[in-house]
Amino acid sequence: MDLSVIIPIYNEEATLLALYNRLCNVLAPMGLSSYELIFVNDGSADRSLSLIRELAAHDPHVRYADFSRNFGHQIAVSAGLDLSHGAVVVIIDADLQDPPELIPALYAKLREGYEVVYAKRRSRQGESVAKKFTAKLFYRLLARITNISIPVDTGDFRIVSRKVVDALRQMPEQNKFIRGQISWIGYRQTYVEYDRAERAGGETGYTYRKMLRLALDGITGFSDVPLKMASVSGFLVSGVAFLVMLYTLYARFITRDYEPGWASLMVSILFLGGVQLITVGIIGEYIARLLANVRQRPLYIISDTNVTDAPTRPQAAGLPTGTAL
Ligand code: UDP
Ligand code: MG
């Protein structure tokens, strides 16, 4: 199998057929000996699944897996990676914001001797100012506080080699941030620039809540800076508190010039309380993710699929399976 295309689907009935047609038009002339389109239906509530089944009935290139519920975009892509057979794998959004016509360029670049070619957004259309601003801020912040270089302004639209897929499948974390994991893996990586289009139809499946979760997964997965910030801010605040304490004692016993200090007391209590809550919250974010990994639940549940010959998972180095933690 030369090439697999992974397409996560969450309520995409409006764009599915157009996507399929454009993918076929792009892939057919590429001279591949074989390819597959893997649709991962992430608990859609619309007609997406029946459309996919119809495509699969007519076209042997179409493979699909149907999740038992909505597990999230990153997990849908992970399932696609698990089911893929291709020597190279393309990850693409279903809403045609990532143009399928860019695939030959990504593929050609990969053949020059890279293991990863990601598609970098030169511009993005049809998205709210708030979304563009938060995305921009997030990518910059992430670049500052992680010690691997995760490319800015880049989603998951990319082509990767089988080596990278195997490495990804050995990474057992539950809170996936695939673009970060791919940077972490290394190898020779490069990019191709493109202009990101508007959604061709339907609505975004990424609510602010899901975006926030993805952002937190990216940060906690690849940076300890927030944890360290918690202790640094603890030291800073204690330092200031100590100085204020000295001043209070001085005013009380030396100058004896003091007010019954209700205001200052309230301010310091509220301030210290705030810092403590933030710190506890940051620790909580990390502990929650620790817990998710200790539970070792399967990442997703497939209720139906036409992929009968999924490749077996490469064995991860390190802990033998079944080791108690
Ligand atoms: N998606 C998914 N599960 C979700 C949300 C989104 O599989 O819970 C898919 C969606 O069908 C699309 C891709 O992830 O193929 C990107 O989602 P979307 O276009 O809604 O995100 P945006 O481009 O607005 O960030
Ligand atoms: Mg989109």
Image (cartoon, grey):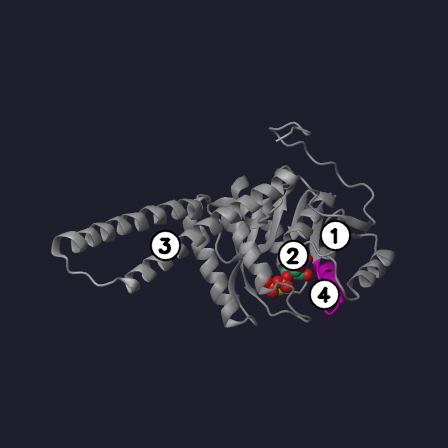
Instruction: Nearest to the eye among marks 4 and 1: give it.
Output: 4
Q: Which of 195 and 275 is in front in this view?
A: 275
For the residues marked 4 and 1, what is the alpha-carbon distance in whole angstroms?
15 Å
Residue drawn at 38 percent across, 45 percent down: 231
Q: Which mark is residue 92?
A: 2
**Considering the numbered disc 3 on the image, is that residue within a helix, a strand or a loop?**
helix
Which amino acid, mark 3? Leu
* Residue under pointer 4: 12
**Considering the numbered disc 1 on the image, is that residue within a helix, a strand or a loop?**
strand
Which amino acid, mark 1? Ile
Magenta highlight range:
9-26
Residue behind label 4 places its C-beta within 8 angstroms of ligand 1: yes
Label whose residue precedes the other's in the sequence (2 or 4): 4
Q: Which mark is residue 73?
A: none
**Considering the numbered disc 4 on the image, is that residue within a helix, a strand or a loop?**
loop
For the residues marked 3 and 1, what is the alpha-carbon distance in whole angstroms?
52 Å
Label whose residue precedes the other's in the sequence (3 or 1): 1
